[in-house]
Amino acid sequence: MLDAVVVGAGPNGLTAAVELARRGFSVAVFEAKDTVGGGARTAELTLPGFRHDPCSAAHPLGVNSPAFNGMPLARYGLEWLHAELPMAHPFLDGSAAVLSRSVGETAASFGPRDAGAYRRLIEPFLPKWDTLVRDFMSLPLSALPRDPVTLARFGLAGLPPSTWLMRRFKDEKAKALFSGLVAHVIAPLGGLATGAVGLVFALAAHAAGWPVARGGSQAVSDALTAYLKDLGGTVHTDYEVKRLDDLPPARAYVFDTSPTALARIAGFGSFYESYRYGASVFKVDYALDGPVPWTAEEARAAGTVQVGASKAEISTALDAASRHGHAPDRPFLITVQPSLVDPTRAPEGKHVFWAYGHVPNGWTGDLTDAVERQLERFAPGFRDLVLARATAGPPELAAHNANYVGGDIACGAASGLQLLLRPKLTLQPYRTPHPAVFICSSATPPGPGVHGMSGHNAAKAVWRRLRQEL
């Protein structure tokens, strides 16, 4: 009998498996797709030689992850590549705000009226980032914080809505960039703890950057898989699990799946019926004949580029998708330029480019024209460079990754209390009604992102139970 079986070979499932195998437990992973990866995959979606990331592309939480940083993943081929600037936010006048590794450079890009406010917001937390990131990404509530004073200060700044936090800024550049940071979790700007979302992304950039993985996001999953196999674990692909009886006997079962799928497979009935799924995205992967012709010079040097003319425009786009049930006319875009720093991603002189805008859950329309009209506002001539494109709306995203219910790439709405307490209001979020069944997906704390911490935290709950049985 195995000690543990993990269902789902995304970053969280693989991390959970690695953490258990490192402690001497026998582990097997079962994945429905023909390759591992979940939200961290790479494939030729457009033309031969153009390698795209179908889901996640830039990894500020991955490079900052205590779980990943505690593993020898570089030995297994994972290499983080950093653009000159982690992120840029261009404006229609050709200027840009930036998120640089330097707090000073970032503050200066906001202009003299907001530079000091940004420094006062960020600088108290940055020297204590390593401890702070462990505290807010570890087991919620039941874990003793390593630095409770700093965590409390962070909570005071971050728990209110981001609209409150942004009151300290006077000009548009700081407000727009910070609004864009919050939008990465597809949350309306006025929601609970959205200030913390923006702070986390900003601090992550200053602490370790917003890199891409050499060769694509698949490198993250492949490194975890190789390490797991060296530890004695096994991985089985093309193995769809429809019920618990489909799996071999084990002392524990760990699911890197949505709560909906887990309830169906394990027969939990309505246990997760109150869990909410949020808005989706419409994503376009491009093969380009050259780099994106951004008007703002800073955007040409940034790995990630946020595209939204103002805080108001970004808020309107988020509200359209999340609250009003329609696609925005001017979508806020998150874009990534991997081939700026990784020439292996495209033929010589060519580029891959990744962009998405927010749309309602389950939306079946085509946002391509709106995405490209928005890009043309900030990069005139963009369409002339397009060699090929691959589009994916909510149905395609859900088909690619079953955890994206209705195309929700966060595996659950990151709004209200569910941003902090997911998938249930409980001190033991990784446990389920069955004592031997656990959940470790992005539906559990600390939530969405390629960081493995949900798997890391769930593995702790599993090995505590397994040790109690010995």
Image (cartoon, rainbow, N blue to C red):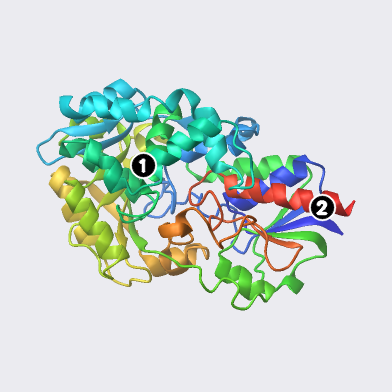
Residue 172 image point, x, y percent: 16, 39
Q: Dividing the picture into quarters, in which one does residue 105 lie? A: top left
Mark positioned earlier in the residue sequence (1 or 2): 1
Residue 176 image point, x, y percent: 22, 42
Residue 288 visible from this viewpoint: no
Q: Dividing the picture into quarters, in which one does residue 337 lie? A: top left
Tell me if residue 110 comes above or below residue 445 in the rendering.
above
Q: Residue at x 56, y 63 (%)?
A: 424
Q: Residue at x 32, y 72 (%)?
A: 364
Task: Decide: few, some or many residues near mark 1? Use Cα within 10 Å; few <14, some 14-19, many ≥20.
Answer: many
In the picture as drawn, the residue positioned furthest to the left comes out as 93
The amino acid type, in three-letter code, at marker 2 is: Leu
The residue at which mark 2 appears reads as 466
The residue at which mark 1 appears reads as 198
Looking at the rendered structure, the secondary structure element under dot 1 is: helix
Residue 387 image point, x, y percent: 27, 50
Q: How many marks?
A: 2
Q: Dividing the picture into quarters, in which one does residue 304 lie? A: top left
The amino acid type, in three-letter code, at marker 1 is: Gly
- Please state if 459 lies on the left or on the right of 66 as rendered: right
- Please state if 62 lies on the left or on the right of 248 as rendered: left
Q: Residue at x 67, y 76 (%)?
A: 267
Q: CA distance from mark 1 to mark 2?
A: 38 Å
Quarter of the picture holding the N terminus: bottom right
Q: Residue at x 62, y 72 (%)?
A: 263
Looking at the rendered structure, the secondary structure element under dot 2 is: helix
Of 291 and 440, which appears nearest the observer?
440
